[in-house]
Amino acid sequence: MRWRALSCILLGAALWGTIGWFVKHLYTYGFTPMEVVSIRAFSAAAILVVYMLTTAPRKMRLDQVRDISYFLGTGICSIIFFNYCMFSAIQLTTIPVATALLYTAPAFVCILSIFLFKESMTKTKIAALMMTLVGTCLIVGVIPVDLNKLQPAGILFGLGSGIGYALYSLISKFALKKYTSLLITTYTFLVAAVSLLPFFPFKDKGHLFADPAVLLFAIGLGFLPTAFAYIIYTYGLLHTQASSASILTTVEPVVATVIGVFVFTEPFSGLQLLGMCCIIAAVIMIQLSTVRGSAANKKCISRTG
């Protein structure tokens, strides 16, 4: 089961890495970054709600009305907040710097998981965390550091995006005690879509969706790197520690870099290759650690039995 959970987390993170392909195409039609965030939330929410109402409408019911607080957390505090902070960081600094600050999320998850879930901070986790942070910085080009690009406000927004990104793993871990990954993902994007609804310029850009290509990119963005990716990632969280899952998600910039190089013919350096190796090595460390932990638990059970 743990291998399946790890595979789900890695696949979900890898699918997040394909976002750039859809986003770049939508940008060519004149959509702004935050409008693309809205399109992503609307499309994912529509796909998920239609699917659930068609296949299992009763499963959309919440046990308690107050449980909506979980999805206000994942939808607004995580999805909307981290996107707003990330795009603000991009405006104030650069895309590489903003991306590197976004991937401080595993550090926040590891620290908060100690207090929220009583997870242990092992030497393997610390080593893997350091390798993912260095690897991400190498991939996005932050190392070597250009101090002229590091504005205080941009750094604060970047760290805010990391905190918002981390909140999804943490809040979902609580919600998974009562609800399925499918329901959590559905309500997350439903809340996000409703919250963003008043801010989308339908009068100015609504006509663009009459173009089949725009509709295809919008639906694709809502399904593959959003609805499907979040469902399998949230499922993987059910059987994995939040801290380990968060470290595994750093395969996203690796996939994004590969797509950038082979699809959009973006430049690729030796430092980026070294960064990819760091992240892949960290993922392997977490996987091997999980396997050893599972084997040790089985031995303990067999001895006590």
Image (tube, helix red, strand yellow):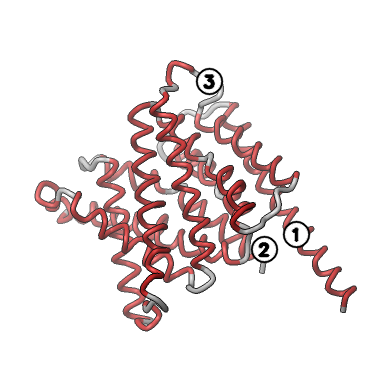
Q: Are marks 2 and 1 in contact (CB under 8 Å)?
A: yes
**286 with respect to 145 (left or right):** right
Q: Nearer the viewer, residue 248 or 59?
A: 59
Percent x, y of residue 238: 58, 66
Q: Is residue 85 visible?
A: yes
Q: Is residue 29 above or below residue 50?
A: above
Q: Quadrant of the N terminus?
A: bottom right
- SS label for mark 1: helix
Quarter assignment of residue 197:
bottom left
Whichever of callouts 3 and 2 sits on the residue coming sooner in the sequence is: 2
Quarter assignment of residue 227:
bottom left
- SS label for mark 2: helix
Whichever of callouts 1 and 3 sits on the residue coming sooner in the sequence is: 3
Identify residue for label 3: 145
Q: Quadrant of the C terminus?
A: bottom right
Whichever of callouts 2 and 1 sits on the residue coming sooner in the sequence is: 2
Can you tell which mark lies on residue 291?
1
Of all residues shown, which one is farthest toward the top?
A: 148
Identify residue for label 2: 3
Q: Is residue 160 above or below residue 202?
A: above
Mark 2 Cα-neighbour bin, 10 Å: few <14, some 14–19, many ≥20: some
Q: How many angstroms separate mark 1 from mark 3 (CA)?
A: 37 Å
| Amino acid carrying mark 3 in the image | Val
